[in-house]
Image (spheres, grey):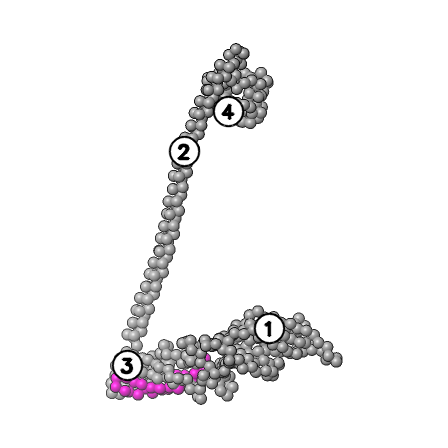
């Protein structure tokens, strides 16, 4: 087939019908640029397009491919030749598309591989950043450790003592005190060396025992002050020379925390109902509270040290009911129960419930479960979850 001859034939037939390239292109379903390429012999229409063109021009595909309308006696021969040429052209075109498709697949594989490498590189960079952050954090920790060691060493070198220690004996519930036993070794000792420690207004004399100085002090276990004058102050006297040193590492406040764990109460799924009742002219409300409560008291060694656990309810600070629930406390010192409380209240009443635990020393630990007051809008909960501690005589020690 001759491309120029085919193109000239298409142009001739288009012009005979007074069609512009754009009008013809719209009829065929291609662009006017495609029509221009056909007519200038730069490309062929494909098989499907040839069918459309033959219908528009009312000629055979063989006439289009031969570039002229064949005479009747030559139609069969021309048609056979042009069909063969069309098949060969289609094969060439198909081969070109196959090659193009293979190239696209190869390019896609290459791009996918490149993207995968980029992804791997991104992960590698991310890992490097995380490792760098970890190394920087580790480096800071090492610097802090070195600084602390240097600071500790400088304190030791500046200290008047080569050794200081304080041991705490058992809590005495009769006096609410803890015995503190001090042991100190001064760096410089003479026959006339004396040591004393001042805590607040109290002064403890340490007696010499070999190379050590030992002294005892009964400290109030429930002191919560954090004032500087409660930091122990060591005094060393050698004749007329007297030197002082603060001992902030020895604690004198909150000593009870060494023997108690916090009493914790968690309430969930609270459901309250308030129903007005009129009885012979007396108006009051039936108030019901339902909730799940978990109460914990566990010592540091997971061995709960307590005697009793009670649930107390009050109306206007007047005791309403005391319920002993010790039997329901598990081996880990935990009490779990869905509880229901019923009250008959007036509009200005206040209702409360407490968990009260008596520990092995005889102290009472109290924590509020709920605290409801009433106004025109209904019940309002003002629960205070701070633990309070009382001694055996019900004297408040910690709040």
Q: Nearer the viewer, residue 328 or 118?
A: 328
Toward the right, the furthest residue is: 281
Q: What is the magenta range?
A: 199-227
Give the alpha-carbon distance from disc 4 to disc 1, as whole Å: 84 Å
Q: Residue 186, image x and y in percent? A: 28, 81
Q: CA distance from mark 4 to mark 2?
A: 23 Å
Give the mark toward the camera: 1 or 3.
Answer: 1
Q: Which residue is mark 1?
A: 290
The local crowd at label 4, few if under 14, some if 14 to 19, many if 20 or more residues have their Cα within 10 Å, is: some
Badge 1 density bin: few <14, some 14–19, many ≥20, Cα 10 Å: some
Q: Is residue 370 left or right of residue 230?
A: right
Identify the residue shown where x is 35% and y is 84%.
181
Task: Judge whether residue 306 can be spotted in this image.
Answer: yes
* Residue drawn at point x = 40 percent, y = 76 percent: 301
Q: Distance of mark 3 from mark 2, alpha carbons? A: 90 Å
Q: Nearer the viewer, mark 3 or mark 2?
A: 2
Q: Give the CA separation, mark 1 to mark 2.
A: 74 Å
In primary-sequence order, the first of circles 4 and 2 is 4
Q: What secondary structure is found at the residue carrying circle 3? A: strand
Residue identified by numbered label 2: 102
Nearer-the-camera pick, 333 or 386: 333
- Residue for badge 3: 186
Q: Residues within 10 Å of mark 2 (few under 14, many from 20)?
A: few
Do the residues bearing badges 3 and 2 touch, measured as CB atoms within 8 Å? no
The answer to which of 173 and 220 lies nearer the viewer is 173
Find residue 326 and report its horizontal and vertical position in percent. 51, 80
């Amino acid at each position: 087939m001759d491309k120029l001859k085919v193109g000239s034939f298409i142009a001739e037939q288009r012009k005979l019908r007074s069609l512009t390239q754009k009008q013809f292109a719209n009829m065929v379903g291609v662009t006017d640029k495609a029509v221009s390429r056909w007519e200038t012999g730069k490309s062929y229409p494909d098989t499907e397009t040839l069918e459309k063109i033959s219908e528009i021009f009312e000629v055979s595909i063989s006439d289009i491919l031969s570039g002229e309308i064949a005479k009747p006696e030559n139609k069969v021969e021309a048609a056979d030749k042009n069909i063969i040429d069309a098949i060969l052209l289609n094969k060439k075109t198909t081969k070109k598309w196959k090659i193009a498709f293979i190239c696209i697949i190869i390019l896609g594989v290459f791009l996918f591989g490149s993207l995968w490498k980029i992804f791997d590189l991104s992960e590698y960079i991310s890992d490097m950043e995380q490792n760098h952050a970890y190394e920087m954090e580790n480096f800071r920790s090492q610097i802090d450790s070195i600084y602390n060691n240097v600071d500790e060493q400088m304190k030791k070198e500046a200290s008047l003592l080569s050794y200081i220690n304080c041991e705490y004996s058992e809590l005495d519930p009769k006096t609410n005190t803890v015995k503190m036993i001090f042991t100190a070794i001064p760096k410089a000792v003479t026959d006339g060396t004396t040591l004393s420690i001042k805590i607040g207004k109290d002064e403890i004399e340490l007696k010499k025992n070999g190379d050590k100085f030992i002294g005892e002090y009964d400290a109030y276990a429930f002191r919560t002050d954090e004032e500087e004058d409660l930091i122990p102050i060591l005094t060393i006297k050698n004749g007329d020379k007297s030197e002082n040193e603060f001992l902030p590492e020895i604690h004198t406040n909150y000593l009870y925390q060494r023997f108690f764990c916090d009493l914790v109460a968690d309430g969930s799924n609270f459901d309250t109902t308030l129903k007005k009742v009129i009885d012979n002219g007396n108006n009051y409300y039936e108030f019901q509270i339902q909730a799940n409560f978990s109460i914990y008291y566990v010592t540091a060694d997971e061995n709960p040290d307590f005697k009793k656990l009670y649930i107390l309810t009050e109306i206007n600070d007047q005791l309403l009911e005391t319920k002993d629930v010790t039997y329901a406390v598990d081996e880990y010192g935990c009490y779990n129960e869905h509880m229901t409380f019923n009250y008959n209240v007036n509009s200005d009443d206040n209702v409360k419930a407490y968990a009260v635990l008596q520990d092995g020393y005889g102290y009472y630990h109290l924590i509020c479960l709920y605290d409801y007051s009433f106004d025109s809008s209904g019940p309002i909960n003002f629960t205070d979850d701070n633990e309070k501690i009382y001694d055996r005589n019900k004297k408040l020690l910690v709040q």
